[in-house]
Amino acid sequence: MEEKITYFETAGLENTEETLRLAAERAKARGITKIVLASTTGETARLAAERFDGTGIKMVVVPHQYGFIGRQRFPMALVSELEQQGHRVHFGTMLFHTDGFYGATTPSVMAILLRTLCQGMKVGVEIILMATDGGCVAIGEKVIAVTGTGRGSDTAVVAIAAPSTKLNELHVTEIICKPLETKSWPAGVRPPLRPEPKS
């Protein structure tokens, strides 16, 4: 089997439209009807809902968990709006940020290892586990995860979903797109936000 992977020269917001287009295209080609999407402020979720309207794709939107960075940044009005469109919004425990809870460094090591591919790969694996743990995605269901670096989307993968209790059953089967060059940041350090491109 031969398939195309798109590599973005830079990571971040400017790749969102193309990432969503590529994800929708691959979903159609594979008969996938569910996309698990990371969205912190709701901007990417709103854009994706518009992009996927009329395609039969339903999203499971996964924002930050409550208490992760002060107040919840995902607007509650948008939760209702998305749910009325048939999408789900799941606020679950961010599994790779639980060292204090478990008292071990395994989640951080996993996060660092996944970031060697790109930040979006770490987030993609994490939100698929979270969505499956929350019952929003079935165990063994083929989904597409759409994630990014800082803001927007720049990474998309096809994966077979599994819960965190069966991590060995989660398989990333295809990389649709990702940033070409990546950087892993030390624990507690977040990737710098790029300024929004001027129109």
Image: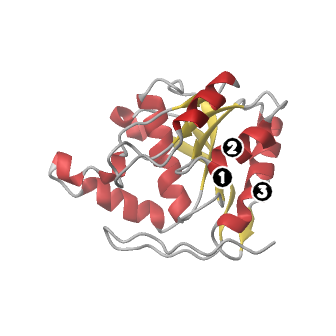
- Spot occupied by residue 107 in the image (x, y as percentages of width and height): 30, 53
Closer to the camera: disc 1 or disc 2?
2
Most foreground residue, 60 or 143: 60
- Spot occupied by residue 98 in the image (x, y as percentages of width and height): 26, 49
- Spot occupied by residue 100 in the image (x, y as percentages of width and height): 18, 52
- Spot occupied by residue 159 in the image (x, y as percentages of width and height): 59, 41
Number of numbered discs visible in the structure rendering: 3
Q: Is residue 1 visible to the viewer in this orientation of the structure?
A: no
SS of the residue at dot 1?
Answer: strand
Mark 2: which amino acid?
Arg
Farthest-out residue, left: 103
Mark 3: which amino acid?
Glu
Q: CA distance from mark 1 to mark 3?
A: 12 Å
The quarter of the picture where residue 77 lies is top right
Q: Residues within 10 Å of mark 3 (few under 14, many from 20)?
A: some
Q: CA distance from mark 1 to mark 2?
A: 17 Å
Q: Which mark is residue 182?
A: none
Establish if 154 lies above or below 89: below
Q: Which mark is residue 17?
A: 3
Q: Which residue is mark 1?
A: 156
Q: Earlier in the sequence, mark 1 or mark 2?
A: 2
State if disc 2 and disc 1 touch (CB < 8 Å). no
Establish if 19 lies above or below 55: below
Q: Is residue 157 left or right of residue 6?
A: left
Establish if 199 lies above or below 158: below
Closer to the camera: disc 1 or disc 3?
3
